Image (spheres, rainbow, N blue to C red):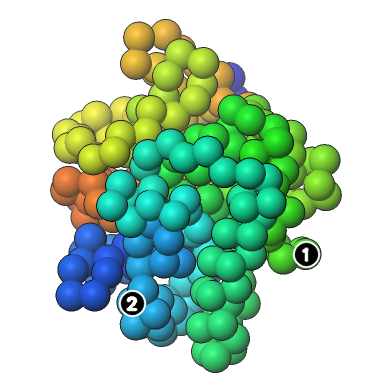
Amino acid sequence: MPPIKHKALINVDLGEGHGNLKCGPDDELLPFIDIANVACGFHSGDPLIMFSTVSACKARNIRIGAHPGLPDLQGFGRRYMQLSPEELTAITVYQVGALKGFLDAEGVKLNHVKPHGVLYGMMCRDLEVAKAVIRGIPKGVPVFGLAGTKMEEAARDEGVEFWAEMYGDVKYSPDGMLVIDRIKKPWKTEDVEKHVRQQLETESVTATDGSTVHLPVKEYPLSLCCHSDSPGCVEIVRTARQLCDEFNKEYGYS
């Protein structure tokens, strides 16, 4: 397959702490990223953390999006929950609205919405779940998701701009879905390099069973996601940054 046709940007989940507890080294990651997905309080995050994260991202001209999750602090939004469509829409409106309050106070635009964890996985597989969440996104705001899944279909049906994602520190199953670990596992730098390079250069990925899976990015804008709670996340994101910069330079994506 040919390489992707858009500039590769990096997004990272930030603000995933609570009170005095920090989840990831956000300050160390900021120099390497283009886009931040800020936790909105349901799976992690709180008002002070949201406030400081927005301020830090603004200072570095990092685009900021909302990262709503299931109401599951104990499980970090990585446990399955069954909610009605009305609940899914409502929790999205609630969380995005919370972050937007901080963005408005800083005079910063809401760049996008990217669902978190198991909610993201549920949207990939279930069209009604995907539509219910997307209906909670403010008009004119894009959604980040996995191309070739029900998320893409729901965005198209609901008239919402879609951005395709690839992943620097998440494995893929043979059906092209993400393997969502409740607790992130470490990655060797050489494995991150191989994983990211394959996705960027061939629009495909090696799945957990060794098969090669096509990633139907199509003509969508693209962002590569990494996680702030992955062991060794600074080195993972630094490696992803280097590979994305090399890719963008080689193909003239300014």
Three-letter code for the amino acid on which mark 1 is drawn: Lys
Nearer-the-camera pick, 113 or 202: 113
Q: What residue lies at 38% left-to-right and 28% top-to-bottom?
A: 179
- Position in image of residue 174 (x %, y %): 46, 13
Figure check: 30 above or below 103: above
Q: Earlier in the sequence, mark 1 or mark 2?
A: 2
Which residue lies under the disc numbered 2?
Answer: 49
Figure check: 188 above or below 56: above
Three-letter code for the amino acid on which mark 2 is drawn: Ile
Q: Secondary structure at mark 2?
A: helix
- Position in image of residue 238 (x %, y %): 27, 53
Q: Which quadrant of the figure contains the C terminus?
A: bottom right
Residue 176 visible in rendering: yes
- Position in image of residue 54 (x %, y %): 43, 79
Figure check: 203 above or below 76: above
- Position in image of residue 137 (x %, y %): 68, 60
Gap in angstroms between the C-alphas marked 1 and 2? 26 Å
